[in-house]
Image (cartoon, rainbow, N blue to C red):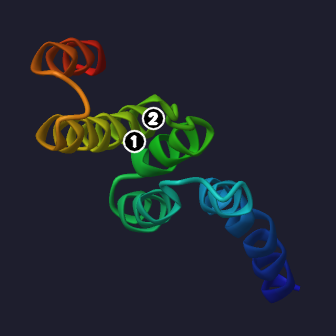
Amino acid sequence: MGGTRIWLILLVLLPILFLPSIIAISKNHPHKIPIVLTNFVVSVFLGLGWFIALVWCFIVPSSNSSRCSHNSFSSADEIRKLHELKEQGVITQEKFESKKATLL
């Protein structure tokens, strides 16, 4: 009877213990690997890791940072194209400078 009780407790507690990992993986969180590692490693040693991982799995980073890096590459490409047009004589130096200032 005692062995059955232990298994029942483990079947209830283990999913609760790894709940942050389960949520992060099921939501395909962009930081799911660090969340899982925090949940496994830090929870074992400190117990506070479970709470940290639980909160973290619900915080989804904004896509503004990726949008900014994408725009910077796009702006650099545009400036490169404008420079080529200026070198070919299609646009003037003044037009190049004004378009470059607009992109930056």
Residue at horizontal 34%, vertical 53%? 46
Residue 23, compared with residue 91, is above or below; it is: below
The residue positioned 69% from the left and 62% from the top of the image is 22
Which numbered circle lies on residue 67? 2
Cβ atoms at labels 2 and 1 below 8 Å apart: yes
Label 2: element kind: helix
The x, y position of residue 24, in whole percent, is 63, 56
Mark number displayed over residue 58: none
Estimate how packed mark 2 is, as few (under 14), some (14 to 19) or many (20 or more) residues with alpha carbons within 10 Å.
few
Q: Quadrant of residue 34?
A: bottom left
Position of the C terminus, as image quadrant, is top left
Q: Is residue 100 above or below residue 76?
A: above
Q: Secondary structure at mark 1?
A: helix
Image side of residue 10 versus residue 46, left or right: right
Circle count: 2
- Residue position for label 1: 70
